[in-house]
Amino acid sequence: MSEGWREKWKDKEITVQAAINKIIPGNRVFIDSGCSEPQLLTSELIKQSEKLIDIEILHFLAIGPEKYFKDKAEDLFRHNVFFIGKTLREEINKGQADYTPIFTSEIPSLFSSGRKHIDVALIQVTPPDPYGFCSLGINIDIAKPIAQSSYITIAEINPQMPRTLGNSFIHMKEINFFVYNDTPLLEFIFDE
């Protein structure tokens, strides 16, 4: 795929620092889940954490290598997960993070109905096709309805994200800003 799409959508491309600057204190931020976690955006979010107070981070499954917690409960962000994975289990048990019990099938309507809102959605997608559609790739669980209902959607466009078919597309018009990051996807490692 040619890089002509970057010229077409250049008004939406920003630096990773500028992308995270769109998040303001008090925001509720969704981070794309599992192997689709936008690594560049997540890393910068943690770097800028000192100025981002009162931020609630929503995940479905966090597996990234970034450390969301320091040594004190009040450090960094308040996490709210829909699935208890290894990376946040200890913090949930200590009361430093929250778990919202919900059926996975009910999560999309929770946001699309407006019962719960997202200020900023951080997602990872493929480069757009000639018609402007990006694929959410390997992770189409809850990201699409959340990204479409958030106030601001910031995409990390990664050419290494596989393009999948079906109900996995989001148009560049629905993405407010994007950063470009050509990097391998995270891998889920099963413990024995």
Image (cartoon, grey):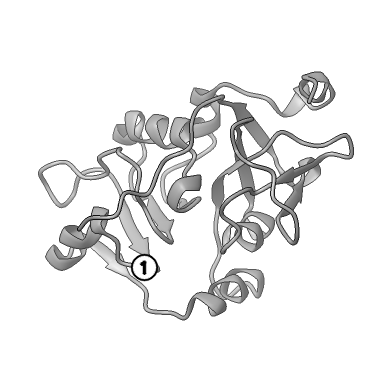
So how many labels did they put on this image?
A: 1
- Quarter where residue 166 is shown: bottom right
Dot 1 amino acid type? Phe
Relative side of 125 to 28, left or right: right
Q: Position of residue 51 (x, y in %)?
A: 34, 34
Q: Position of residue 144 (x, y in %)?
A: 65, 58
The relative height of residue 37 versus residue 90 in the rendered view (above or below) is: above
Which residue is tagged 1?
83
Image quarter of the C terminus: bottom left
* Residue appearing at x 56%, y 25% in the figure: 181
* Residue appearing at x 78%, y 26% in the figure: 1
* Residue appearing at x 46%, y 44% in the figure: 37
Q: Nearer the viewer, residue 166 or 74?
A: 166
Q: Position of residue 64 (x, y in %)?
A: 35, 43
- Quarter where residue 75 is shown: top left
The relative height of residue 143 versus residue 109 in the rendered view (above or below) is: above
Relative side of 22 to 84, left or right: right
The relative height of residue 44 versus residue 67 in the rendered view (above or below) is: above
Q: Residue furthest front?
A: 192
- Counting other residues with Cα less than 10 Å from the Cα at mark 1, is it few (<14), some (14-19), or many (20 or more)? some
Relative side of 106 to 176, left or right: left
Q: Nearer the viewer, residue 18 or 89?
A: 89
Element marked by disc 1: loop
